Amino acid sequence: MRVRPPRPAAHLLLALAATLAAPRTAAADPIDLAVPADRKALETLAADFAKARPKTKFETWDPAVRADLVARASKLTLKEGALPAVRDVFWKALKANPPGPPGRGAGKDATAIPTPYGPATWIQKGSGGGKGLVLGLHGGGEGAGSASEAAGKWTMPDCLAMYPQGIRLVHDTWNTVHGERFVLSLLELAKVRHDVDPDRVYACGFSMGGTGSWFLAGRRPDLLAGAAPCAGVLMAAPKSQVATAAEVQELQHGFVPNVRNLAMYWFIGLADRNCMPGTYLYAWDRLLELRKADPTGYAKLQFTMYPDLPHTFPPGEPTACLKWLGKQRREPEPEVVVWEQAEAPYPLPETDLDRRLGRLPVLDFYWVHCDRPADRGVVRAVRKGNEFDLSFTGGDVRDLSLWLHPGLFDPAADVVVRSGGKELYRGRPVPNVAAVLESLDARVDRRLTYDRRVTWSDR
């Protein structure tokens, strides 16, 4: 077996990746939640998991604690059909020890979390309880930007709304290490503390908020039902502020191909001098090329160019945008997944604190997992019944694995995984608690929780 050296992108998570790849040690019999001892063992594990899990994306797991939890979970296999009940046990534990601000006064109405940069605050409107969530990102730039600007624009009926205030007001705040960690922390908090519907999460913004909404949409489309990245820019070379598509030499990779299954509605003014239209025009050309080559994908994209529009909303917006967006629902388990990986997207960390925290590696994308993402690697995963076909350019297919539950395949028949015509796996994966724990930990998402993980090759 050849030894593959670690890549810098995931150096902080190698210990966790090793745990994820560990072989499962099955119990003699599947646990039965009707048996008091089995239920107690599961409830204790879930409670320990929820207490130990980091409360925000500015914190990290203790690798030894997490490894112990996964080892305990690995000993517990499940009966077919037990996933909903087991997931509910873990969710109840998370509700008792939720993400977000700790301690007294940290209830549903709290609107601040501690971070290494100081408190991160947001404006909150509405309520959850099965409703959707609007993440409204404000515009601005160096030394400028207010959550109140977004709060006056991005609202939807039957949705909780959160409008984060940039922790550090720099250009492209939402694309930074601290901006990304803040927004993802809010999303986890909303799902657990407020019970928002994970299939109705919308990222919206104008100007710098549009730039940030595109960043979240391209990097984590599996967490969203839709995005409205209006009048922003995309990171590009030689620079992002250009007037025409012809001036763009290269877009930031790891974003545009990833929105294959996402609903998006956005616009740009061709007379905009604050957020010049060139990168959006270039990205739209690429999306049209991708749509032509993949007729079943990139179908829910609504982009409009306004010839004489400066840096402002066109008539009727954002009302029309929000009306359209509110009808969209997430496609959490698409039959085809396209994932282009970006190890260190721009803007690069600028401060010592940014560099110490580093970027959050994206290890899970819909129902695909990658232990060690390869920068510029492109995964295309297709599922049809019990057959899964993978292609991975720029990376090693042995770093991939699949999250599964009975809604994605027939447990009474073999699962077959192929890549390049070569069979990587054939068998009937056994449902187990470790897969529930790991997949729930990855995204704190009830719809993206799985009861088995298929791995292959010489792990």
Image (cartoon, rainbow, N blue to C red):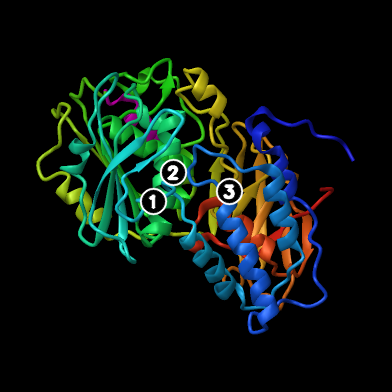
Residue at mark 2: 184
Nearest to the eye among marks 2 and 1: give it: 1
Instruction: Label the magenta part by its dominant secondary structure.
Output: helix
Tell me which segment is drawn in magenta. Answer: 276-286
Labelled pair 2, 1 in contact (Cβ < 8 Å):
no
Q: Earlier in the sequence, mark 3 or mark 1?
A: 1
* Picture residue at 65% right of the left edge, 69% below the top: 42
**Does residue 414 appear in the picture of this structure?**
yes
Q: Locate residue 95 relative to residue 105 in the image: left or right.
A: right
Going from N to C along the chain, the mark reached first, 3 or 2, is 2
Going by the image, does 450 lie left or right of 260? right
| Front-lying residue, 167 or 422 | 167
Q: Nearer the viewer, residue 354 or 98?
A: 98
Q: Residue at x 62, y 36 (%)?
A: 377
What x and y, as percent, mark residue 291? 43, 46
Residue 275, picture quadrant: top left
| Residue that sits furthest to the bottom in the current view | 34
Q: CA distance from mark 3 to mark 2?
A: 14 Å
Asked if one can make out residue 286 in the rendered structure from this viewpoint, the answer is no
Q: Where's the N terminus, which quadrant?
A: top right
| Residue drawn at 48 percent across, 62 percent down | 96
**Circle on res. 250:** none
Looking at the rendered structure, the secondary structure element under dot 3 is strand
Q: Residues within 10 Å of mark 3 (few under 14, many from 20)?
A: many
Q: Judge from the rendering whether residue 250 lies leftward or rightward of residue 38; answer left or right.
A: left
Which residue occupies the extreme top position in the image? Answer: 238
Which amino acid, mark 3? Asp
Residue under numbered circle 1: 104
Would you say residue 408 sits in the magenta stretch?
no
Mark 2 residue type: Leu
80 above or below 243? Answer: below
